[in-house]
């Protein structure tokens, strides 16, 4: 497997990153099976593992710690995140003050809690899971710099930050002589291409590594949601049925595009999932693509995607289906500034 520099961190990572969001109550509660998935990924050459404190309220981190015990920890670039409240998760409405966000208080406490759950002395990449408009970026950067100097983390990055926030952070880091953000983790897939307009070029200019999430668009590009396939009642289809409701015009367009993409994948001699991952990795601004298996089969079916070579003709055909810089449906994962809310405009 070919390993690439992770931005300016000096660390080398595999093109596929194992995302552990589905480990625990959010997906697979069988800890032993999740551990086997991690071990299989490591045996296949994947050395990059990503999780977050909010995934299954910390359970994912606990499972990840179990999987990396016994001498495997030092062979892995381990990434985790903080920002969301542990209780209630990303969609918690009544959030207890000071138990979420990007303040120094929350960052430092969350890091210590993650170190304990992961059963490790250090985190290779510590990421802010979302922007926090209530906290000056100077405070967040100061806290993260202190964690580096204390040896608790080796590098730090962001997740789903807009390009303008990354530029502001770069200026603040330069002005205060702070260590800057080293990575960004945005959503990116054939169906979600908005980051090609500004975010990926910004990361390239700032020498930031990018580990993209949802390269299979939440399951649409996995190859299991087909026009003539039986309706599925497990996994993502059970947790978020509206995402796959073809009475929605956007979802119907996705369904039709899947059939077109399957034809291309068949001609290349790969699965739709492998085609989709290979396409994401083809962009020179992408360092690694996060795969998030819930069961072993989800992992084994995408292995080898990083070795698929796509010709210019194939890339042109995909561009004809979904234009560069566009999205097939409104991107629910994109961070929207609270400045658009009525209370901030009136």
Image: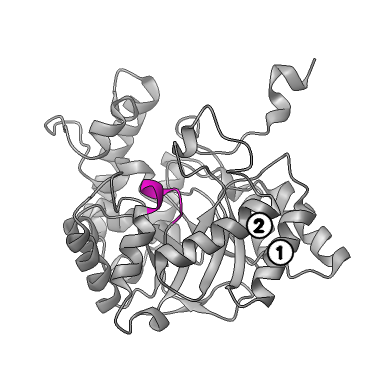
- Vertical placement of residue 85 versus 246, above or below: below
Quarter residue 154 falls in: bottom right
Q: Residues within 10 Å of mark 1 (few under 14, many from 20)?
A: few
Please tell me whether residue 252 belongs to the stretch shown in magenta: no
What colour scheme governs how the chains and residues are painted in the rendered image of this protein? one colour
Quarter residue 289 falls in: bottom left
**Residue 90: x, y in percent?**
48, 38
Taking the spot 51% from the left edge, 75% from the top edge, the residue there is 122
The secondary structure type at the circle numbered 2 is helix
The answer to whether residue 200 shows anywhere in this view is no
Q: Which residue is mark 1?
A: 205
- Vertical placement of residue 193 versus 277, above or below: above
Q: Nearer the viewer, residue 110 or 28?
A: 110
Taking the spot 35% from the left edge, 20% from the top edge, the residue there is 248
Please tell me whether residue 55 belongs to the stretch shown in magenta: yes
Q: CA distance from mark 2 to mark 1?
A: 6 Å
The answer to whether residue 95 shows anywhere in this view is yes
Q: Is residue 256 left or right of residue 279?
A: left
**Residue 107: x, y in percent?**
62, 56
Residue, far left:
230
In the picture, which quadrant includes the C terminus? top right
Circle number at residue 201: 2
In the picture, which quadrant includes the N terminus? bottom left
Q: Which residues are magenta?
A: 52-58
**Residue 52: x, y in percent?**
45, 55
């Amino acid at each position: 497997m070919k390993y690439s520099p992770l931005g300016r961190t000096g660390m080398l990572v595999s093109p596929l990153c194992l995302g552990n969001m589905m480990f625990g109550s959010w997906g697979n509660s069988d800890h032993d099976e999740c551990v086997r998935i991690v071990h299989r990924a490591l045996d296949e050459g994947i050395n990059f593992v990503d999780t977050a404190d909010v995934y299954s309220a910390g359970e994912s981190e606990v499972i990840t710690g179990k999987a990396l015990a016994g001498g495997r920890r030092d062979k892995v670039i381990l990434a985790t995140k903080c920002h969301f409240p542990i209780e209630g998760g990303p969609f918690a409405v009544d959030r207890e003050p000071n138990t979420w966000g990007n303040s120094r208080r929350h960052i430092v406490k969350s890091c210590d809690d993650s170190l304990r759950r992961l059963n490790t002395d250090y985190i290779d990449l510590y990421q802010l899971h979302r922007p926090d408009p209530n906290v000056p970026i100077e405070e967040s950067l100061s806290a993260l710099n202190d964690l580096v100097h204390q040896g608790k983390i080796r590098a730090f990055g962001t997740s789903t930050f807009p390009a303008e926030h990354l530029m502001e952070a770069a200026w603040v880091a330069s002005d205060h002589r702070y260590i800057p953000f080293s990575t960004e983790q945005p959503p990116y897939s054939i169906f979600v291409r908005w980051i090609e307009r500004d975010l990926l070029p910004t990361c390239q200019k700032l020498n930031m590594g990018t580990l993209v999430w949802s390269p299979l668009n939440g399951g649409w590009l996995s190859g299991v949601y087909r026009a003539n396939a039986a309706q599925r009642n497990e996994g993502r289809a059970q947790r978020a049925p509206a995402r796959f409701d073809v009475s929605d015009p956007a979802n119907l367009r996705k369904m039709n595009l899947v059939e077109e993409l399957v034809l291309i994948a068949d001609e290349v001699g790969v699965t739709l999932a492998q085609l989709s991952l290979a396409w994401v990795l083809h962009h020179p601004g992408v360092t690694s693509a996060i795969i998030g298996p819930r069961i072993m089969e989800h992992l084994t079916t995408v292995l080898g995607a990083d070795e698929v070579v796509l010709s210019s003709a194939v890339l042109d055909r995909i561009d004809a289906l979904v234009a560069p810089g566009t999205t097939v449906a409104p991107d629910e994962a994109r961070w929207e500034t609270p400045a658009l809310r009525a209370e901030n405009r009136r």
